[in-house]
Structures are given as C-alpha cells and as structure tokens.
Amino acid sequence: MDWKNLLVFSSFAVNFFLSLIIYFRSKKTTANIMFVITAFGITTWCLAMIFYRASDSSNVLFWTKLLY
C-alpha cells in the first residue's frame, strides 16, 4: 500500500469514527443527521477510492463509475 492509499484510508477511518460518535451521541438534531449522512458519503467515496487504486485493469472501469 502506497502513501496515497494510506492517506485516503486515514481519511476514511477519521470520517467513519466521527460519524459513529455523532450518530450515537445525538440523533435528534437535523444538523447531526446531516453531518452523519455527509460523513457516510465521504467514507463510501474513500473506500471506493482505495479499491480503485488497488485494483487491476479488469476492475478499474467499475470503480471509476462508482467514484465519479
């Protein structure tokens, strides 16, 4: 794993754990719900980017379509 994937993975981990903390701490406010939805979208994008960068040429088109 190269340094770019490590950077994307660290972003994935931070956003994932922040979204879990905010979700379980307070589910009532609209701002917290919107933050969790946004953070979940970012974590999904980061995970897809990691798989895109680590995939071989046969799966690149699938991950590219998922990312963009």
Image (cartoon, rainbow, N blue to C red):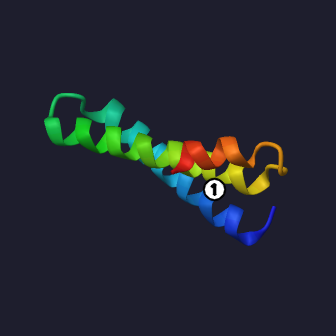
Q: Is residue 51 left or right of residue 32?
A: right
Lateral position of residue 32 relative to residue 13, left or right = left
Amino acid carrying label 1: it is Phe
Residue appearing at x 17%, y 42% in the figure = 31
Q: Quadrant of the N terminus?
A: bottom right
**Residue 68 spot, x, y in % from top left:** 51, 51
Q: Looking at the image, which residue is at 69% across and 63% down?
A: 6
For the question of whether residue 65 can be seen, the reply is yes
Q: Residue 25 versus residue 14: which sits nearer the camera? A: 14
Q: Is residue 1 above or below residue 66?
A: below
Within-10-Å neighbours for mark 1: few <14, some 14–19, many 20+: some
* Residue 8 x, y percent position in the rendering: 61, 60
21 lies left or right of 3:
left
Q: Which residue is mark 1?
A: 9
Task: Name the quadrant containing residue 24.
Answer: top left
Give 27 or 52, whichever is nearer the viewer: 52
Q: Residue furthest bottom?
A: 3
Q: Which of 59 and 42 lies nearest the eye of the viewer?
A: 59
Q: Is residue 13 visible?
A: no
User: Could you tell whether 48 is left or right of 41 in the image?
Assistant: right
Q: How many marks?
A: 1
Residue 67: x percent and y percent?
A: 55, 49
At 39% from the left edge and 46% from the top edge, which residue is drawn? 39
Against 27, is 49 above or below? below
Q: Secondary structure at mark 1?
A: helix
What x and y, as percent, mark residue 37?
33, 38
